[in-house]
Every structure is written in structure tokens, then in C-alpha cells.
């Protein structure tokens, strides 16, 4: 694991910027002020049929000052890394707060957080993805793509690699100064197949999740790439020739590679307190899990235990300290099926007198203000719980679902529909071949209420996504969701072709 922050970031005049901005903000009467300096490196590679289709390399460097002045937020940013610019930005942030004060209907107050002095945090990874040459990355993805294309069933193969290094320096008037670095990678391959007899075509994608790791995730032993790529053509062949599902009620065994997305949409977004209080109503919607239901809402069955955390190893949302200087922590969101907590930043925690923030403030660039963003929200396994095979063995008539694909959920995160990559019929406790055209549909509380069993720790997988969107102007954040394999009883299955009128 790299023990230090990239010198290209630490060589920036971080402390001089902080001293200049915070001193000026204090002189102008700020109740709170923080400075955040960021450098974000972002690279994407795409291949089509083993040939490079496109590359993108971006670096975003800048700083921002955020203040609370007379109970009102103020914010400004710049890219000029000089103390003089920091003073101007602090003055601009104060001016924004003054102009906004007559329009503010609520005074901003922030939940207390201890000062941590000067601290450094680096995420857990071995190989900096930006130290690996583009030639080596393209060569590996081309080799894997060529292996897929060697099979008659595969008409096309697409491959992609996305890597991010995020550096942040934060300092506030209370005395916290953090310097942090985290790395994440997302690599995937998708095969497009055609069946000549039926004229049908379909896709099959790798299940490898995006992770808070370095390039060792691609070339090391953290994921069995060779095994999955070897199996993909056979899975695709079976999928193309599989019968279409008959709609109705089925028991479902759901693999973590599918369930993570259902967690994200029906729990993760629903338990963001700003959303539950209506602050996102104009854009992203509200939540059925309103604040008056805290402690009483029966979210799911008694075996449902969901935590939020900002410190899961290799989690995409994991960090040492958030963008308000709050130390990362873990907490309960759902305990034994009951709603017991929300995701909070310091302002949202104070609005409802919930005590300390749980560290969910994040801005995706130096030009954006921090907003409340999702933690790693995860369904916990059962200690000594069953294996996936044992869960399948409990089902007489059902479907085993693997991998995510399309989804739809309403603006209150209540009525939803999800599909997947692969669907296997379960008959008398055994897998009996693939099915096609499957979607499961439910309300959030009915679905999680039908959860009969969660697998043991051996079935737990940390999935996630790079592209969770929120806010106006829009911001994008990466977030992980862990879960074990799970057994749900009597869930409604739709035939997607029939629903589409085909």
C-alpha cells in the first residue's frame, strides 16, 4: 500500500492557501469557514472488438472556500493557486452569503465535530493505476477481448477501464486539517452474441465490481478474471437459447452482483436525510421513509440489518474524513427490519437534533459545494449463515438472479422493477437452466419484508457503482454496497417482452 500522498499534490501551496483564506474569512465575521483543495485525475479507455476505440484523460485542480456567515451559506472557488486568489475567494464566499441572507428561510447551523489537528489518510491499494502504461492496459483488454471473440457465439466484444485518483486537502477554522488520497478502478467486458437459428441477439457482461483498489484488482488475485471470461461465452449461448419466463410469483435467490443495485436505489437513496426531508424534491424526488417514521417503520423482515459506513475496506465511498472534517464511521440504518438511522452531513444532523454527523458530505470537484452524499450502504450477512447453494436448496420453484442490468424506481423510492444479467430456473432445490425476459417488481417494504434468509459471510460481496448522481448542479459520486446472497419468498416476476407488447 502506498504510504504517502502523491508529491504532485503535496507540492501545491496547500497551507498558504488555507492560512490566507481562513484568516480573511475570520476577519469578515464567518461563523464557520473551510478551504478545500482538490486534484482529481480521471482516465477512461474503451475497446471495441479488441481495438482501441477511445481514450480520455482529465485532471481537475482547484480550490474552494465555503463559509457560514450570519446563518447563511456562502461558497466560491478558483483555479489560481495563490494566497492572493485565496483571499479573493474568501471575500467572494462571504459576499455570496450576504446576498443570499434575505432569501434564506432557515438559519444554517452545523452539528459539532471535534477538531482533529493535522491528519493524513491514504486508501488501501498496491498499484497506482496511473503508473501503468496505456500500452499495457490496452494490451491486456485486447487480449481478453480476443479470447471472447474466438468463440462463434460472440459477434462483438467491448471492454473498458476507468481509473480515478482523488486528492483532497481540507482545513477549517476549528483546527482540522486533512490531506487525503484515494484510488478506484472499474474494469468490465461485455460480449454481444447472436443466435443464427432464431435471429435473437443478447449481451453478457462481467460481474467484477468497481473497487477502491489499484491496478492489482485487474492483474492480481483479488478477482478471477480468467475464470469468468472462460465461462461467459457458454453463459451467453445458453441465454440466447433459453425459454422466456412465465410471469407470476416466484421465490428468488439473489446474488450480490444483482442485489447491490436494489440496495442502492431502495435503501441508499431512501435513507438520505436531506431527501427524506424534501430538500431534493425539485430534482431527485423525496422518500417514503420520512422522518416521522424513524424508529417505527418496518422496512423489512427481522433478518434485515443494514449499515452505513464510510470506512469499509476498498469501499468506493470510504474516506478518512469527509468534506466537512468529520471522521469516517459506521452506523445502523435498518436493524432487525426497522428503520433506525439516516445518512447525515453536519447541517442535516443539526436540523433534526440527531447529534453528530455520520460523515456524508462530499463534493465531486473543487468547483462544487459539498452536499450530503451516500455512504457505503450494506446488507449484513448472518453469522454462520447458509451458502448460496443452501439457499437454492430451500426453493421448490424459483429463480436465481445474477448480475445487474436495467432498473426503474419511482421518485419516492417505493415502487420498483429490476432486471439482471442471468436468470436460472430453480426446480426442487436445483438449478435447471437459464430463463429470459425476467424482471422482478415490488414495493420496497413488500420486497424487503419477503426476505426470509441472508447468506453467511462467505457469500458476501462488495459491489457498487462509479456514477451515482445527485444535486443541482449535478454531481457524481462512487459508492459501494455489500451484501450476501439472499432468499426472498413470493416476489412478482414480469415477462419483459410481454410487458413491452412484443
Image (cartoon, rainbow, N blue to C red):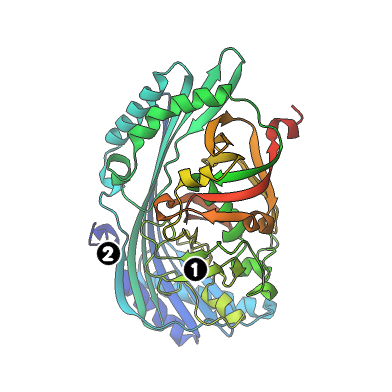
From the viewer's side, name the closer residue of 189 and 440: 440
- Res 10 label: 2
The quarter holding residue 450 reads bottom right
Foreground tag (1 vs 2): 1
Label 2 sits on a secondary structure element that is helix
Badge 2 density bin: few <14, some 14–19, many ≥20, Cα 10 Å:
some
Of mark 1 and mark 2, the one earlier in the sequence is 2
Which residue shows up at 54% across the image and 72% down it? 344
Tell me the quarter of the picture where residue 161 sits: top left
Q: Is residue 148 above or below residue 403?
A: above
Front-most of 386 and 314? 386
Quarter of the image with the C terminus in it:
top right
Vertically, is 342 above or below 437?
Answer: below
What is the crowding at mark 1: few (fewer than 14 residues within 10 Å), some, or many (at least 20)? many
For the question of whether residue 44 can be seen, the reply is: no
Q: Position of residue 486 (x, y in %)?
A: 53, 51
Residue located beneath label 1 in the image:
361
Indicate the secondary structure of the residue bearing disc 1. strand
In contact (CB < 8 Å): disc 1 and disc 2: no
Tell me the distance, in whole angstroms, between the alpha carbons under discs 1 and 2.
23 Å
Q: What residue is drawn where x is 49% and y is 77%?
A: 91
Amino acid at each position: 500500500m502506498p504510504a504517502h500522498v502523491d508529491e504532485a499534490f503535496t507540492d501545491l501551496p496547500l497551507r498558504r492557501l488555507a492560512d490566507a483564506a481562513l484568516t480573511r474569512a475570520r476577519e469578515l465575521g464567518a461563523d464557520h469557514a473551510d478551504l478545500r483543495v482538490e486534484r482529481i485525475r480521471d482516465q477512461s479507455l474503451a475497446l471495441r472488438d479488441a481495438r482501441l476505440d477511445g481514450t480520455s484523460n482529465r485532471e481537475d485542480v482547484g480550490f474552494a472556500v465555503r463559509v457560514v456567515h450570519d446563518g447563511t451559506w456562502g461558497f466560491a472557488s478558483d483555479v489560481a493557486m495563490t494566497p492572493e486568489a485565496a483571499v479573493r475567494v474568501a471575500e467572494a464566499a462571504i459576499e455570496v452569503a450576504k446576498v443570499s441572507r434575505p432569501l434564506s428561510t432557515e438559519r444554517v447551523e452545523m452539528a459539532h465535530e471535534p477538531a482533529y489537528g493535522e491528519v493524513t489518510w491514504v486508501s488501501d491499494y498496491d498499484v497506482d493505476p496511473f503508473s501503468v502504461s496505456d500500452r499495457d492496459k490496452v494490451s491486456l483488454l485486447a487480449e481478453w477481448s480476443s479470447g471472447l471473440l474466438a468463440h462463434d457465439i460472440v459477434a462483438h466484444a467491448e471492454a473498458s477501464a476507468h481509473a480515478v485518483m482523488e486528492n483532497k486537502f481540507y482545513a477549517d477554522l476549528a483546527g482540522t486539517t486533512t490531506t487525503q488520497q484515494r484510488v478506484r478502478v472499474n474494469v468490465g467486458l461485455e460480449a454481444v452474441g447472436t443466435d443464427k437459428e432464431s435471429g435473437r441477439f443478447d449481451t453478457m457482461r462481467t460481474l467484477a465490481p468497481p473497487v477502491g483498489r489499484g491496478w492489482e484488482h485487474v492483474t492480481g488475485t483479488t478477482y478471477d478474471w480468467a475464470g469468468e471470461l472462460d465461462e461467459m461465452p457458454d453463459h451467453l449461448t445458453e441465454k440466447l437459447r433459453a425459454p422466456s419466463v412465465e410471469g407470476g410469483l416466484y421465490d428468488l435467490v439473489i446474488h450480490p452482483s444483482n442485489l447491490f443495485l436494489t440496495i442502492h436505489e431502495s435503501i441508499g437513496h431512501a435513507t438520505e436525510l436531506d431527501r427524506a426531508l424534501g430538500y431534493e424534491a425539485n430534482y431527485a424526488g423525496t422518500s417514503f421513509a420520512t422522518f416521522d417514521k424513524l424508529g417505527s417503520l418496518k422496512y423489512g423482515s427481522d433478518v434485515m440489518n443494514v449499515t452505513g459506513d464510510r470506512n469499509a475496506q476498498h469501499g468506493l465511498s470510504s474516506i478518512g474524513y469527509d468534506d466537512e472534517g468529520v471522521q469516517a464511521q459506521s452506523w445502523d440504518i435498518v436493524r432487525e427490519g426497522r428503520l433506525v438511522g439516516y445518512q447525515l452531513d453536519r447541517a442535516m444532523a443539526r436540523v433534526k437534533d440527531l447529534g453528530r454527523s455520520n460523515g456524508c458530505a462530499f463534493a465531486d470537484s473543487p468547483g462544487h459545494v459539498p452536499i450530503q452524499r451516500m455512504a457505503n450502504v450494506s446488507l449484513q450477512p448472518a453469522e454462520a449463515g447458509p451458502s448460496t447453494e443452501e439457499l437454492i436448496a430451500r426453493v421448490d420453484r424459483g429463480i436465481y438472479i445474477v448480475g445487474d442490468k436495467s432498473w426503474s424506481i419511482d421518485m419516492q423510492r417505493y415502487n420498483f422493477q429490476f432486471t439482471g444479467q442471468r436468470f436460472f430456473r430453480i426446480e426442487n432445490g436445483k438449478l435447471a437452466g437459464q430463463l429470459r425476459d425476467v424482471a422482478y417488481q415490488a414495493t420496497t417494504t413488500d420486497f424487503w419484508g419477503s426476505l426470509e434468509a441472508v447468506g453467511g459471510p462467505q457469500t458476501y460481496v462488495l459491489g457498487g457503482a462509479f456514477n451515482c448522481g445527485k444535486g443541482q448542479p449535478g454531481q457524481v459520486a462512487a459508492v459501494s454496497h455489500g451484501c450476501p446472497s439472499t432468499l426472498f419468498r413470493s416476489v412478482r416476476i414480469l415477462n419483459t417482452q410481454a410487458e413491452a407488447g412484443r
